[in-house]
Image (spheres, helix red, strand yellow):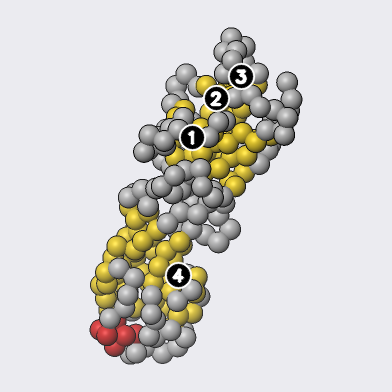
Amino acid sequence: MKQLFLIILLALTKSFLAQSLPVVSEPPVHVLYKFYPNLVQLSLSNYDYKEYILVNDSMEVLLHDKNGIRLSPNNFIVKIPWLNKMDSVHFELFDRSNMQESLKRISFKIISPPDAVVFIDNVLEGGRCSKHPLIIEASAPIDAPVKISYAIEFWTMEIEELEVFGKGSKFDDYAYSVLDKFPSGTLVKFRCRIIDELEYAYYHEAKFYLE
């Protein structure tokens, strides 16, 4: 059999999964993320026209996206349950025309997706922010191998003895009036409720210092 080269991709779009997807890992380390739909794509040599399939007796391997559209040949969606306690999973690779003999065992590490980080006006948490910031937002860490969309539902800003509550990504005049009371270098703490594109929500704490 001609050599198979594997590229592991994470499907992070609510539309058609075969569109521009970021590379998560290349051999020899394969990674699947818990909770998210992982698109596993076999990248074959130019002269290999066979259709292959991945099999795991306890893990569902999907050949269609959530809209029922058939994926391209040699593309599969694997979703690892959030409560899964395994740290790895193994799949057998078969030629679809001969399901009697496994061609190869492919192993994946199972890891949790990266937590979001908070930015204020493009300043990463831990940095210095303006007393009149325009926007607070969450995103995947810059060096994360996946691109997940996040939104901040609401947040609490704590600065010494005062607290300010906000919704969404904007600041209001009251928040500005509180920030104006404190000198440069004052620590500002945020507790944000973050929700991702699959509607998984959690709290994240971030610190900034006033300019």
User: Is residue 87 visible from the viewing direction of this image?
Assistant: no
SS at mark 3? Answer: strand
User: Along the horizontal axis of the image, is 103 left or right of 204?
Assistant: right
Residue picked out by circle 2: 54
Residue linked to disc 1: 71
- For the residue marked with disc 4, what is the amino acid? Phe
For badge 2, the amino acid type reads: Leu
Q: Nearer the viewer, mark 4 or mark 2?
A: 2
Q: Residues within 10 Å of mark 1 (few under 14, many from 20)?
A: some
Query: How far is mark 3 from mark 2, CA to CA?
Result: 9 Å
Mark identifier at residue 119: 4
**Extreme residue in the top direction:** 100
Tell me which numbered mark, 4 or 2, is placed earlier along the sequence.
2
Is 113 placed above or below 98 here? Answer: below
Whether residue 13 is visible: yes
Q: Which residue is mark 3?
A: 95
Pick whichever, 74 or 123, lies toward us.
74
Tell me how far mark 3 sits from mark 1, CA to CA. Answer: 17 Å
